[in-house]
Image (tube, rainbow, N blue to C red):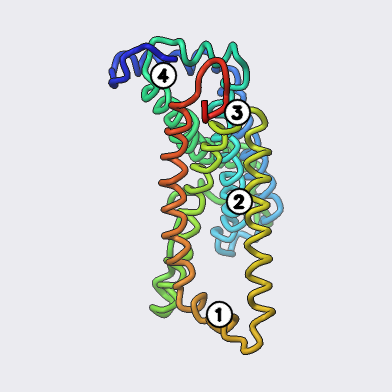
Amino acid sequence: MNTVSQTFNWNRFIATLRKEVVENRRILLFTVIGIYALLTVIMIMGNVINHTPMDVDRQIFTKTPQSLVFMTFSFFVIAVASMAFYGLRTKAGRTNMFMSPSSNLEKFIVNVLIYIVAMIVVFFAGAQLADLTRVAVLKPFEDNGFVVPGPINFLKLISFGNEELPSNIQELQFWTGISTLLATIASIAVYFLGSVFWPRFSLLKTFLTIFIIQIVTVVLVVVLVEVDATGDIKMWLKDNVNNGNVFRAMSLFMAIVTVLACSLSWYLFKRKDVVSLKWWK
């Protein structure tokens, strides 16, 4: 058990943060370099594949890298979140973590900052740097048949609606975007929980658990629709998708999942000890 005072101390927190970064600098550095290299390849290949004549709107290029970057982001953040407590896999790792002179709260916040907050910032910084690399590499080859658009601002590409569309479509797009954003945040929280609950093979175990839950949910919905002879359930689902109620409900559900996952992560982490990973001991 950790005999250190469990009140938050700023100096101890900074020391714990520095210790985590120094001890895991190689894996963190390889992660940063790896994501930058992958994004650079995506940017360059996207530009080469989507090159257009000079008189065509240059923003056409942004469609492919935008979707690929955000797909990469979705996987990157859950993979990194699954690494947050990989040190708990071994007794030596647990000894190093729980016997260090810092409170459990300080250790927990340090892992949240490094493996979630910092990595999100690093990802988008890497995406922007990768896009600048694309411009630097391909600009010398630009001619009338090959366009190299200027740097993309990926933050500006995040949008929840199009003002040119009717208000009902704008609202539907808004709630679709909100539910997608909250689903991403909930995924991060759930995989972070998985890293506490299953330090060994956390990513795989959490993925399989979520996959099984999703399959069971889809099967239940399909069964309900098929056994409904009147078609009321199918019509209800269609109406609620069209008016955005499904996405509003999904947003609320994802927010609840995020809060529960974060709370359970903290609860389980407090119950870990050096001897055993079993949360009930």
Task: Quote the CA–CA distance across marks 2 and 4.
Answer: 34 Å
For residue 118, side relative to residue 82 (left or right): left
| Res. 178 visible in picture | no
Relative vertical location of residue 101 with respect to residue 163 in this rendering, above or below? above
Q: How many residues crowd mark 3 within 10 Å: few (<14), some (14–19), many (20+)? A: many
**Three-letter amino acid code of the residue under disc 3:** Pro
State which mark lies toward you, 4 or 3.
Answer: 3
Q: Residue at coordinates 41% horizontally, 14% vertically from top-left? A: 2
Q: Residue at coordinates 50% horizontally, 53% vertically from top-left? A: 183
Looking at the image, is mark 1 or mark 4 earlier in the sequence? Answer: 4
Residue 5, image x, y percentages:
31, 14
Q: Which residue is denoted by mark 1 in the rendering?
A: 238
For residue 113, side relative to residue 94 (left or right): left
Task: Quote the CA–CA distance across marks 1 and 4.
Answer: 49 Å
**Along the line of sight, the residue nearer the viewer: 30 or 240:** 240
State which mark lies toward you, 2 or 3.
Answer: 3
Residue 170, image x, y percentages:
42, 73
Check whether the beta carbons of the residues at disc 1 and disc 3 lie within 8 A of each other: no
For residue 38, side relative to residue 84 (left or right): right
Q: Which residue is denoted by mark 3 in the rendering?
A: 199
Instruction: Give the secondary structure at mark 1.
Output: helix
**Three-letter amino acid code of the residue under disc 4:** Leu
Q: Residue at coordinates 51% horizontally, 46% vertically from top-left? A: 151
Q: Which residue is denoted by mark 4 in the rendering?
A: 17
Mark seen at residue 65: 2
**Along the line of sight, the residue nearer the viewer: 169 or 184:** 184
Task: Quote the CA–CA distance across marks 1 and 3.
Answer: 41 Å
Check whether the beta carbons of the residues at disc 1 and disc 2 lie within 8 A of each other: no
Task: Quote the CA–CA distance across marks 2 and 3.
Answer: 33 Å
Task: Quote the CA–CA distance across marks 4 and 3.
Answer: 20 Å
